[in-house]
Amino acid sequence: MLRIAVPNKGSLSGPAGEMLHEAGYQQRRESKELRIVDPTNEVEFFYLRPRDIAIYVSSGRLDIGITGRDLLVDSGADAEVILPLGFARSTFHFAGRPGTANGIEDLKGRTIATSYEGIVAAHLADRGVDASVVHLDGAVETAIELGVAEVIADVVETGTSLRNAGLEVFGEPIMKSEAVVIRRSGAEPDATTEPKVQQFLRRLQGVLVARTYVMMDYDCRVEQLEKAVALTPGLESPTVSPLHNEGWVAVRAMVPAKEAQRIMDDLYEIGARAILTTAIHACRL
Ligand SMILES: Nc1ncnc2c1ncn2[C@@H]1O[C@H](COP(=O)(O)OP(=O)(O)OP(=O)(O)O)[C@@H](O)[C@H]1O
Ligand SMILES: O=P(O)(O)OC[C@H]1O[C@H](OP(=O)(O)OP(=O)(O)O)[C@H](O)[C@@H]1O
Ligand SMILES: [Mg+2]
């Protein structure tokens, strides 16, 4: 049975559960459940605090886990990213009241509040800056107004939380993060669980592809086929089938969803007709 850690709360929890559900895994019915078995897929899910997941996985007690790249780095646990998942994207920044500092070089002797002490301490040490770090559990934006720190280091997504607190980022971004699948670093693949791990990764990759691509179908004249195929090269190569009307073919290819409208316009321009896009629900590449 494969043992997988899944975030039980916070920004990662909802999207991780949705992705696992889309990938065909059973998920918990209510948020208080801490552990469920999916017997069909021979997987056991452990719902843990996102911050603790890298620690469980690096201990070898759980095979893999879903967490944030920033939480993995912050924990210092011996685990590595095996698949980025593209949700809970954020950037980790220093911030303060306007004019507080222009960059990390101005932080010598200052007090910095953060929930990510590991990332901040390592970043300061790498650059030889001696500053004090105060650990807070969350809502760190308020630490400045309440005089606990002059500077904060925190996750920024839309920037709304900073703006609401009258703060702005300064200096280079400290790191970029997103949800990731992790496993213990340098572990010898276990012969019994490895096929299940690979199947799990293929399923999640299938969900990612199904979310980012659409299927496009259209008809075009044989003379236009090369131009059309250049616009819709597909993943391997498009399927081309003859139509009953001589001189016409039907073409089918996967295209990135974000580019679908532009590609439809371009295909129309070169004479393609009956251009359709349909959603992909699941795939295995
Ligand atoms: N507003 C946000 N937008 C996108 N990602 C975010 C946001 N806030 C946190 N994250 C990401 O979510 C992960 C943190 O999840 P975690 O559950 O620990 O914190 P949270 O979502 O802030 O919840 P809480 O602090 O209430 O426990 C990190 O990887 C972080 O980068
Ligand atoms: O740039 P934004 O879109 O505003 O998102 C960033 C905010 O979201 C998270 O806070 P959360 O709501 O999880 O509260 P927390 O600070 O208590 O963790 C994070 O800690 C920031 O405060
Ligand atoms: Mg938070």
Image (spheres, grey):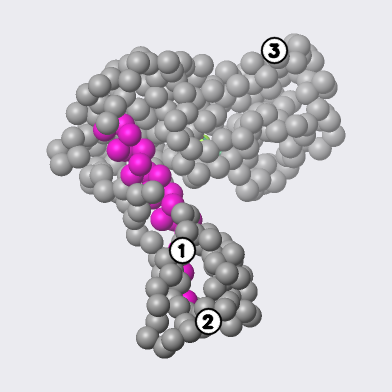
The answer to whether residue 127 is left or right of residue 88 is right
Counting other residues with Cα less than 10 Å from the Cα at mark 2, is it few (<14), some (14-19), or many (20 or more)?
A: some
Residue 75: image x %, image y %? 49, 19
Query: Quarter of the image holding residue 106?
Result: top right
| Picture residue at 35% right of the left edge, 41% below the top | 202
For marks 1 and 3 on the same chain, the one whose residue lies earlier in the sequence: 3
Counting other residues with Cα less than 10 Å from the Cα at mark 1, is it few (<14), some (14-19), or many (20 or more)?
A: some
Residue 83: image x %, image y %? 45, 35
Q: Eyeballing the image, is 42 above or below 245?
A: above
Q: Residue furthest bottom?
A: 245
In magenta, the rendered stretch is 196-218
Q: Is residue 135 visible?
A: no
**Distance CA(mark 3)–CA(mark 2):** 64 Å
Q: Amino acid at mark 2?
A: Arg
- Dot label at residue 221: 2
Q: Which residue is denoted by mark 3 in the rendering?
A: 125
Q: Amino acid at mark 1?
A: Pro
The answer to whether residue 240 is left or right of residue 167 is left
Q: Eyeballing the image, is 15 above or below 249?
A: above
For label 1, the SS is loop
For label 3, the SS is helix
| Picture residue at 48% right of the left edge, 37% below the top | 84
Q: Is residue 243 visible?
A: yes
- Dot label at residue 238: 1
Residue 103: image x %, image y %? 81, 27
| Picture residue at 33% right of the left edge, 20% below the top | 189
